[in-house]
Image: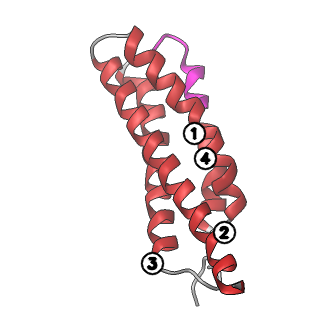
Amino acid sequence: MDPLPRPAAADTTVRTTRAVAVACVLALVALALAWELWLAPTGRRTLALKALPLLLALPGLLRYRLYTCRWLSLLVWLYVAEGLVRAVTEQGPAARLAALEVLLALLLFGACAWQVRWRLRKPAARAA
């Protein structure tokens, strides 16, 4: 028995986009913690708390919750904005970390948006 519930029609696209989204969330959490605690700390280690909303999304992603993909695709733009601002204003390793944050956040948005569109289109196709 599979420990994680799957939607009835968990096809290859849904599984792939979920895997990409989970990988991006885990990478963004690791990046946020490493960035704020060790690699380029700003002096206030409380900025590492920015990883918390991403951790809250992880159980919903693992359970194929469409609602989680929807709100996560909106939340991720905060990480894009932060990464863009820090990529322009900081130099050295912090700028490279910011560019990586932007890349991961955009990839996460793409995976979530693709999954939402795919899963909402399938019932409409079946009804027609």
Do tag 3 and tag 1 residues touch (Cβ < 8 Å)?
no
Do tag 1 and tag 4 residues touch (Cβ < 8 Å)?
yes
* Magenta highlight on residue 42: yes
Above or below — where is 51 with respect to 37?
below
Between marks 3 and 2 in the image, the one whose residue lies nearer the viewer: 2
Instruction: Say whether residue 2 is visible.
Output: yes
Callout 3: SS: helix
Whichever of callouts 4 and 3 sits on the residue coming sooner in the sequence is 3
Amino acid type, mark 4: Ser
Whichever of callouts 1 and 2 sits on the residue coming sooner in the sequence is 1
Q: Which residue is mark 4?
A: 73
Residues packed near mark 3 inside 10 Å, few (<14), some (14 to 19) or many (20 plus): few
Colour scheme used in the picture?
Answer: secondary structure
Question: Residue sitting at 43 percent across and 59 percent down?
Answer: 20
Q: For this view, does 123 lie left or right of residue 85?
A: right
Amino acid type, mark 1: Val
Q: CA distance from mark 3 to mark 2?
A: 15 Å
Q: Which stretch appears magenta?
A: 41-50
Question: Residue sitting at 35 percent across and 28 percent down?
Answer: 99
Callout 1: SS: helix
| Residue 71 x/y as whole percent | 69, 48
Q: Nearer the viewer, residue 72 or 52?
A: 72
Q: Which residue is mark 1?
A: 76
Displayed quadrant of residue 37 = top left
Q: CA distance from mark 4 to mark 2?
A: 15 Å
Residue 120 numbered mark, or none:
2
Between marks 4 and 2 in the image, the one whose residue lies nearer the viewer: 2
Q: CA distance from mark 4 to mark 3?
A: 20 Å
Above or below — where is 56 with respect to 64?
above
